[in-house]
Image (cartoon, rainbow, N blue to C red):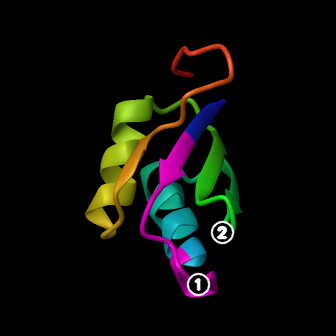
Amino acid sequence: MHHVTVEDMTCGHCAATVEKAVKAADPQAKVAVNLEAKTASIESVIGSDVLIAAIEDAGYRASFKKSCCSHVD
């Protein structure tokens, strides 16, 4: 599971665009976007770097979400 912070999401269209970008990189991915928290949880076999790049290519700043234990998922 990849946990990503997506800084620039402001509306439902943004959330849908992020989900579409992830699905373009991995059509089999399971994506849960939380607009209010500005995060996305992604279940995918694709590497985190590829998923981050796909979200950024869609126009959003994205980064790995820090977990409560100070490591990156």
Residue 39 marker: none
- Is 15 displayed left or right of 61 in the figure? right
Label 1: few (<14), some (14–19) or many (≥20) C-alpha neighbours in 10 Å? few
Label 2: few (<14), some (14–19) or many (≥20) C-alpha neighbours in 10 Å? some
Numbered disc 2: secondary structure = loop
Residue name at image x 53 percent, y 36 percent: 65
Q: Earlier in the sequence, mark 2 or mark 1?
A: 1
- In this view of the protein, can residue 28 be seen by the observer? no
Task: Return the residue at label 2.
Answer: 35
Residue 19 sits above or below residue 10 on the image:
above
Q: Position of residue 41 (x, y in %)?
A: 66, 45
Q: Amino acid at mark 1?
A: Cys
CA gap between label 2 and label 1 equals 7 Å
- In this view of the protein, can residue 42 be seen by the observer? yes
Residue name at image x 56 percent, y 85 percent: 13
Q: Amino acid at mark 2?
A: Leu
Q: Are marks 2 and 1 in contact (CB under 8 Å)?
A: yes
Q: Position of residue 48 (x, y in %)?
A: 44, 32
Numbered disc 1: secondary structure = loop
Residue name at image x 70 percent, y 61 percent: 34
Viewer-closest of 56 and 25:
56
Q: Position of residue 46 (x, y in %)?
A: 48, 33
Residue 30 sits above or below residue 38 on the image:
above
Residue 6 sits above or below residue 29 on the image:
below
Task: Return the residue at label 1.
Answer: 11
- Is 8 displayed left or right of 53 in the figure? right
Q: Verify whether residue 9 appears in magenta.
A: yes
User: Looking at the figure, which quarter contains the N terminus?
Assistant: top right
Residue name at image x 38 percent, y 45 percent: 52
Residue interval drawn in magenta? 4-14
